[in-house]
Each structure stands twice: as structure tokens, then as C-alpha cells.
Image (spheres, rainbow, N blue to C red):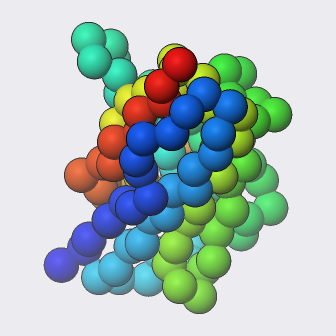
């Protein structure tokens, strides 16, 4: 059974940092891209960041570029999202996803498995 589990969310003041982790299990994910999406109350789910299966390519939404970084440890089937200089508008549920596609990683359609999400709240 495939499982994708996020952790590391919480409450932080504006300007602070958080690191989210996502651990996948149940199959080999070393050939999969991994991505992060988020959904704020009343808004649609949006792309945040993605990393290719090799880790050689990373992608970011314009809203987080320069503040967030994404990395992966393929041996551990884990991806990390380091979030710095957090803003209140970053408040959302953050979802991790994995998928076998190589292109189109900014779209939720590129992903096959999703986690349940972790709440990130940034206070002003």
C-alpha cells in the first residue's frame, strides 16, 4: 500500500522558517518526481515546488521563488521543503505528491499519489 505522509507544519511568525518533510512508502519512488502543493481556505489548490526524479531540476511558483527550496533524499524516499521568510499569505494546508511523469510538474495531473496534508499557519 502506497503511503505519502507529510510532517513539519505548524504555527510560525511572519519572517520565520519551517521545514516540511514528506516520506513515501509502499513502492520505489527513486524514479518519481515529487512536488508540493498548497490550499488556502476558500482557494484552489496551487503548485508550490517540485523536484525531478534525479534531483537535478527544481521548479517553484513565482510567489515562493527565492524563499523556498526543495530537496530530496532518494535513499529515504523523502522530499523536503525548506520555507524561509514566511508570510501570512503562505498560510495553507501543504500537500506532498509523487508521480512518474517527467514534464508538467507544475500541474496536479502529473502526480499519482498524494498525502493528507500538513497545516502551515503564519501569523502577522
Tell me: 43 left or right of 76. left
Where in the figure is residue 105, as x and y percent of width and height? Answer: 57, 41
Which residue is more in the foreground, 3 or 18? 18
- Residue 10 drawn above or below residue 72: above
Which residue is more in the foreground, 122 or 50? 122
- Residue 31 shows in the view: yes
Where in the figure is residue 5, as x and y percent of width and height? Answer: 32, 65
Where in the figure is residue 37, as x and y percent of width and height? Answer: 45, 38
- The residue drawn where x is 60% and y is 28% is 14
Q: Residue furthest left?
A: 1
Label count reads 0
Q: Residue furthest bottom?
A: 75
Tell me: 63 left or right of 1. right
- The residue drawn where x is 60% and y is 79% is 74
- Residue 4 drawn above or below residue 62: below
Tell me: 121 left or right of 36. left
Residue 63's image quarter? top right
Where in the figure is residue 6, as x and y percent of width and height? Answer: 37, 60
- Residue 16 drawn above or below residue 61: below
- The residue drawn where x is 50% and y is 78% is 77
Q: Residue furthest top?
A: 42
Q: Quadrant of the N terminus?
A: bottom left
Residue 66's image quarter? top right
- Residue 102 shows in the view: no
Which residue is more in the foreground, 114 or 39? 39
Residue 33's image quarter? bottom right
Amino acid at each position: 500500500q502506497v503511503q505519502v505522509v507529510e510532517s513539519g507544519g505548524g504555527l510560525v511568525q511572519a519572517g520565520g522558517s519551517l521545514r516540511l518533510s514528506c516520506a513515501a512508502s509502499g513502492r520505489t519512488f527513486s524514479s518519481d518526481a515529487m512536488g508540493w502543493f498548497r490550499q488556502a481556505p476558500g482557494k484552489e489548490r496551487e503548485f508550490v515546488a517540485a523536484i525531478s526524479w534525479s534531483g537535478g531540476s527544481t521548479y517553484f511558483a513565482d510567489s515562493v521563488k527565492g524563499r523556498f527550496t526543495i530537496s530530496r533524499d532518494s535513499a529515504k524516499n523523502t522530499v523536503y521543503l525548506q520555507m524561509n521568510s514566511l508570510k501570512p499569505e503562505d498560510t495553507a494546508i501543504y500537500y506532498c505528491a509523487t508521480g512518474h511523469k517527467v514534464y508538467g510538474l507544475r500541474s496536479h495531473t502529473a502526480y499519482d499519489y498524494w498525502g493528507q496534508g500538513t497545516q502551515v499557519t503564519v501569523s502577522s
